Amino acid sequence: MIERFLKQTTFTSVEDYNKNLEFIIPDNFNFAYDVMDEWAKEEPQRLALLWTNDQGMEIRTTFGQLKEQTDQCAAYLQSLGIAKGDPVMLILKRRYEWWVVMLALHKLAAVVIPATHMLTKHDIVYRNTRASVKAIICVDDEYVTQQIIAAMPESPMVDTLVAIGDNVPEGFHDYLKEIADAPEFKKPEVANDNDDTMLMYFTSGTSGEPKMVAHDFLYAMGHLTTGVFWHNLHKDSLHLTVADTGWGKAVWGKFYGQWFAGATVFVFDHEKFSADTMLRQMEKYHVTSFCAPPTIYRFMIREDLSRYDLSALQYCCTAGEALNPAVYDKFFEQTGIHLMEGFGQTETTMTLGTMPWMTPKPGSMGMPNAQYDIGLLKSDGTPCEDGEKGEIVIKVGERKPIGLFKEYYRDPELTHEAWHDGIYHTGDMAWRDEDGYYWFEGRIDDVIKSSGYRIGPFEVESALMTHPAVVECAITGVPDDIRGMVVKATIVLGKEWKDKAGDDLVKELQQHVKHETAPYKYPRIVEFVDELPKTISGKIRRVEIRQKDTK
């Protein structure tokens, strides 16, 4: 499959990849037709999706069956009036139908807006208004449907509501009943252009109102490198990525790149995360490839991994936030598997990563993905030397890189603020070592300036995470009359340490940081909490901690 879209399909070194990665870009590329339906023609019996849930249900779907189901779904959505360019919001948790509906909407060239089931009425009204949402397709969860119903009086642009499940409320089309009567699917006569909008995400940003990140149809192709190379997938892979379908991470790890590789996507639909339950699923189904945010690995390594048969597991990746070296080391110690870190944003596909032909450095994001021209810039706009901290930027030439977003929809000022003079500014800070590996420092707004020093939150968090008491932590700056700012640590303790929370443990942790990194970085303020404030995609909201400390 990938030979249709790459001039060279295998790589053996960083130099080989950087020199020879080149995409073959067809006109009117559509992932649903050009990848998924082609797999259905070539290998209709190959397993595409293995879906399970915490109630013991299991659905196994081949590429041939998936084509039939997505054609039927596309025909049903056509009968509801959904067509090319229509914005459709999906709130489906991890229901099996999410994968079917996503592909069906691609076939219609509609604009898909995946969203989390945790949205409130206010959130839904905001999204409906900003994106002119025409239809909402949701799970029949009572909270979700009630929030949608409450949002409708302020959402006159929405003319179609569809619910999937056994308890569909009044005012919603009943997907499971009505789809059986769908007419025969007729492929739209007018195909999408490559630069048409295919997908939009409202970023869960660590500050401010969500931005609308618009992606074109080539965005899907941009994830070929994510699945085939970073995840190192092939036809015999059974891949599990831990991500809610409302996150951008879902299409990073449960959709485009994995199916470019012809791998089987494994889904475990569950209400509440448990490391033990997740590991039991991986053991039962012989998962071969796994990707999750560092938070998930932090909980996994606190289990006794020797209790699980993970002999089928071959490859593991992580992204979503920076990986603490202590987590890497502990996971390797227990499994013998290196964690291959990657970095990207809702606005991009994977921009930095540790590829199979690279030796991972614990805590490093890896090297630039060759489909992007990556650099580091100082605050004055000049390039950083090795060892200097700067902002990660993407240099955009005459042609936008495959995978980079189109724009912040309906917000040219915000688009220009981030992307101007041929450079997209990520807002993330890093430094590069002498071997070309990048090391994350934090968001520009998160950097702490104390007594003349610039302190990146991640370096202090990494030091704290090597202490056995610490499950999670967030480092922020607190205003100080003498030092300008002082370092504060907000810490979630392991359950066996919670009764020890007090001055003695604070001093122990402070001394630990002084021993692990430069002494001036140690947290002068330590607060123990039950949980950290996070975005809907699981990223720590340091801005919320800062706001609380400045009230």
Image (cartoon, grey):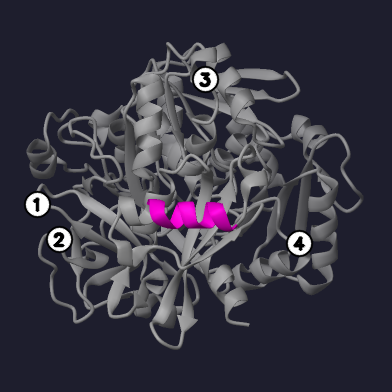
Query: Which amino acid is tagged 3?
Result: Gly
The residues bearing labels 2 and 4 have C-alpha atoms spaced at a distance of 55 Å
Pair 4/1: label in front: 1
Residue depicted at x 18% and y 78%: 381
Query: Which amino acid is tagged 2?
Result: Gly
The numbered mark, 2 or 4, whose residue comes first in the sequence reads 4
Above or below for 334 versus 75: above
Secondary-structure class at tag 1: loop
Residue 15 is situated, as x and y percent measured from the top left of the image, at 7, 40
Q: Quadrant of the N terminus?
A: top left
Secondary-structure class at tag 4: loop
Q: Quadrant of residue 491?
A: bottom right
Which stretch did the figure color magenta?
A: 503-512
Q: Is residue 87 magenta?
A: no
Q: Quadrant of residue 426?
A: bottom left
Judge the density around disc 1: few (<14), some (14-19), many (≥20) Cα neighbours within 10 Å.
few
The residues bearing labels 2 and 3 have C-alpha atoms spaced at a distance of 51 Å
* Residue under pointer 4: 159
The numbered mark, 2 or 3, whose residue comes first in the sequence reads 3
Closest to the observer, 184 or 466: 466
The numbered mark, 4 or 3, whose residue comes first in the sequence reads 3
* Residue under pointer 2: 387
* Residue under pointer 3: 64
The residues bearing labels 1 and 3 have C-alpha atoms spaced at a distance of 49 Å
Q: Is residue 368 left or right of residue 280?
A: left
The numbered mark, 1 or 2, whose residue comes first in the sequence reads 2
* Residue under pointer 1: 434
